[in-house]
Image (cartoon, rainbow, N blue to C red):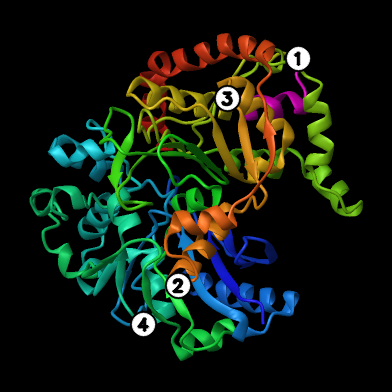
Amino acid sequence: MKEIVMGIDAGTEGVRVGLFDLQGNEITFASTEYKTYHPHPGWAEQDPNDWWSALAKSSRKALADSGIDKKQIIGVSYDATCCSVIACKDDGTPIRNPLIWMDIRANKQAKFIAEKKHPILKMSGYDTVSAEWMPCKALWLKQNEPENYDNADKIVEFVDWYTYMLTGSWTVSTCNATTRWYYNRDEGGWPYDFYEGIGLGDIFEKFPKHILDLGEFVGGLTKAAADDLGLEPGTPVAQGGADAFVGLIGLGVVESGKLGLITGSSHLLMGLTEQNFNGKGIFGGFPDAVIKGLKMVEGGQISTGSVIKWFINNFCQDLVQKSQELNQNVFDFLTPEASKLPPGSDGLLVLEYWQGNRTPYVDPDVRGLMYGFSLNHRREHIYRALMEGIAFGTDLVINSFKKNGFNATELYVAGGASNSDLFLQIHSDVSNLPIYVPKVTQAPSLGSAILASVAAKRYSSIPEAVSHMVHYKKKVEPNFENHLKYKQLSQRYNEAYPILQPWMKGITETVQI
């Protein structure tokens, strides 16, 4: 029988399960959505029961659609949104709904932590701390819901909860702990004095004790998990990690110098380097976060694909209905019109800060902005301007890397944006970089499958598995003439934040956005 590995990708909107052979060929994908709840502006929560039921449904559907016998599945691994923090009991029972990655209610706690100016904050860009990260959300729970904090046996991330539900073992992924919890193996591990200084000295009682690298064997599937997923008990499970970082593996970015861009609800830019790498407005370097022996550097945007979705949901329902009636995609109607427009969308400029700015400013208090409207502008202008604004934000992150010594020469892109030739071309033109698109665009699922192949001992290392399982289908070259036009607009985009930030912050505080 042909050997198959399963890659589980638990994203913001649902769980995708991919089945792959050991050459990286996609057998099938199955996806199940779940809801996100926004009880207050800036808050975002999900129900862990939905996480598990969606996984079970997607796993069973993938097996049924493919005709694969469950005995052919030789390994399983997974990724999940980061940092989605869950407080639960030792048996995995949630104390409350998790605060998912995009939840920014812990702004006050983030500012308090940043004011401590602890040396470990070099990992989050020195001067600022993101409200997304584990210490901020854990501190918010302790200060605002002390009964939930005290009653929690474990405070972990989505991926850690999946580990337990799959194997019955509590572990922490090096990937998540290094990139979001300030764990630093090169400097002794946990910064105990940092946690004690912010009032979380007791949290280590709630963190799992075992810290495993990506691809390490955790254990076999429990009978309960196997029954739910339709798999064989004892199937090897590999330690997973954060969706975007596991996606780097699925992109083939496993050596120094390459730059990966994972697109979806957000944009995340990541590169690997042999050198220690810290800088203002840059997350990292994170030792061993993806590949043992290499540091990872990171930057990104909170609102990208989510902004496009917001636009579709609120301004394109007629096209949504039309696309459903004709069995087409809504973008089939929008993209041709937007493609006819010149770079700059006839004077529209967008700041894509719908949920704040992740990097380089790490500012949760700013919001989205569109400038330049005239009576000449139509819906397709807004659509193109949104894509251009997102691309300007991506380019700003790339340039912040460059200023600190990381000079990217090519981009490897996966996720939702990789399905749009126009979006890819805009990105390439704005940044003047060639873009490589993998054959399997759902890079996190493939990355998880690669981890599974290593835990199943079919490959001796992640890079070896990548050399057999990652392939590319196209290369997008920048249009230099368009780049010159975008260069001027990008400069205006870069000037906007320093000029408008005090004004935007004042409005945000006044109306409590």
The mark that comes first in sequence, 2 or 3, is 3
- For badge 1, the amino acid type reads Leu
Magenta-tinted stretch: 377-389
> Marks 3 and 2: in contact by CB < 8 Å?
no
The mark that comes first in sequence, 2 or 1, is 1
Q: CA distance from mark 3 to mark 1?
A: 34 Å
- For badge 3, the amino acid type reads Leu
Q: Which residue is mark 4?
A: 168
Residue at left 78%, top 40%? 331
- For badge 2, the amino acid type reads Lys
The mark that comes first in sequence, 4 or 2, is 4
Disc tally is 4
Q: Which residue is at the front of the view, 205 or 131?
A: 205
Which of label 3 and label 1 is nearer to you? 3
Q: Secondary structure at mark 2?
A: loop
Residue at left 57%, top 59%? 446
Horizontal side of 235 relative to 281 (left or right) equals right
Horizontal side of 405 relative to 438 (left or right) equals left
